[in-house]
Image (cartoon, rainbow, N blue to C red):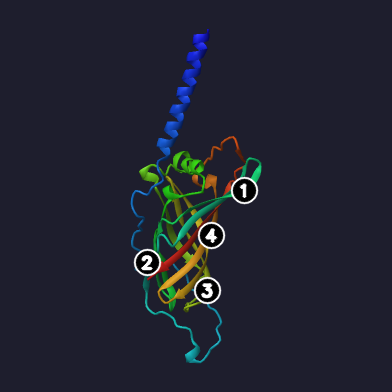
Amino acid sequence: MKNALKWGGLAIVVASIVGVAAFFIRSGSGEASAPVTAPPVSTTTTLATAPETTQTTEVPDEETPATASGSRIFSIVPGESEARFILQEDLSGSRIDVVGTTTEVAGEISADPGDLSTATVGTIVINVRTLSTGNSFRDRAIRGNILDSAQDEFEFSMFEPTAISGLPESVSVGESFTFTIEGDLTVRDVTSPVVFDVEANMTDADSVTGLATTTVTQSDFGISIQAPAQVANISEEIVLELDFVARA
């Protein structure tokens, strides 16, 4: 009887070790397989709807802000831009915000600041394998059984824009503007339509910065988060943000 209990206990220990090892192997290292890149934006396809007409007050020519002219390609800069998700959970009885971030994001924007009716946005690519929440166990779970991003086929999520609305007719250097961008977001092997609200600023003739925000749910992408014992009440809604710097 004692031997049976001894061997039974040993089997449980071995199974636990194997399970932990499998968890670490499945979740990978979190390192990007290669620098993030995005397909070139199409300069022959226009996503923008008719720009909003805004009333302006005429000022003397010498006071008119500079406006870059001609269609140009603005590239989102990895390392200076950041994609993130925000959700809530109860951790050991305390309600907290969980924020996952990565600077591995790329994409291109084609726009003529003097005529935004021709504006278009290319595919936005995010390396979700590199998402970090500041908690290594949580990060491994995300790369493992939540997003499967440790697997090469799911390393990247992509946003394919389909329409842009609410743009002004033109934008000048130093001017802020807002618009919405619709598209299809793919996470793992699930694609769902989303709409981002964007606040942007043309910081100089060669740079555009901005923040794009939307809210999705776990079920939108077939995500099911299996919480450990100390975690409860994980929010169904997830805020997605892209804080971008794009340069021509």
Residue 45 image label? 2
Picture quadrant of residue 114: bottom left
Among numbered discs 3 and 1, the one appearing first in the sequence = 1
What residue is pinned by disc 1? 96
Among numbered discs 4 and 3, the one appearing first in the sequence = 3
What residue is pinned by disc 4? 213
For label 4, the SS is strand
Whole-angstrom CA distance, mark 4 to mark 3, is 16 Å
Identify which amino acid the numbered label 4 is placed on: Thr
Identify which amino acid the numbered label 1 is placed on: Ile
Whole-angstrom CA distance, mark 3 to mark 2, is 25 Å
Among numbered discs 2 and 4, the one appearing first in the sequence = 2
Q: Are marks 4 and 3 in contact (CB under 8 Å)?
A: no
Q: Which numbered disc, 3 or 1, marks the residue closer to the eye? A: 1
Among numbered discs 1 and 4, the one appearing first in the sequence = 1
For label 2, the SS is loop
Picture quadrant of residue 57: bottom right
Task: Please tell me which residue lies in front, 205 or 197.
Answer: 205
For label 1, the SS is strand
